[in-house]
Image: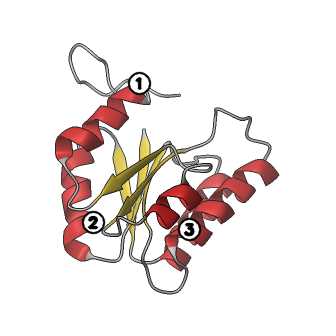
Amino acid sequence: MRILIIEDEPICSLILAKCLQSVGEIQTASDGEIGLESVRAAHLAGRPFDLICLDIMMPKIEGQTVLKEIRALEAAHGIAQGKEAKIIMTTALSDQHNLLEAIPRCDAFLSKPIDRGDLMFYVRKFGFLNGRTNEPLDRP
């Protein structure tokens, strides 16, 4: 499984990576622009990400815009609905506006500080872990 963490705060990125290190191959991006380029490059290489953790407040391109661009890129590459990357929005913001704007395009929304149990709940829900052993499932 391929995981992209798009997060400008190094500590938050490190925490997410540590929580997910046993689940799959992790790549990080320190801002929205780098994150979007990473997603584009992965699609061009034929190895798109399975899971993306995406912060909302970031420099260069903020997370809501990155989310829209990722979904547009997936549509342009003909990725069928339901086969897109699972995207978990992460934020220190707790306002309804950000939640309502992200929900139609993202698969989950977690507030910081990220709780490992909540994060792993979604990883299991998305089918990336074997429910009984918590071992990563083999992905094509």
Residue 24 % position (x, y): 34, 41
Residue at x-position 64% and y-position 59%:
70
Q: Secondary structure at mark 3?
A: helix
Cα separation, mark 1 vs mark 2, equals: 24 Å
Q: Secondary structure at mark 1?
A: loop
Residue at x-position 48% and y-position 58%:
99
Residue that label 1 marks: 138
Residue that label 3 marks: 64
Residue at x-position 36% and y-position 70%:
7
Are dots 1 and 2 in contact, CB under 8 Å?
no
What label sits on residue 17 in the rendered view? Answer: none
Numbered circles on residues, count:
3
Residue that label 2 marks: 13
Residue at x-position 65% and y-position 53%:
43
Cα separation, mark 2 vs mark 3, equals: 18 Å
Which of discs 1 and 3 lies nearer the camera? The answer is 3
Q: Secondary structure at mark 2?
A: helix
Which of discs 2 and 3 lies nearer the camera? The answer is 3
Q: Amino acid at mark 2?
A: Ser
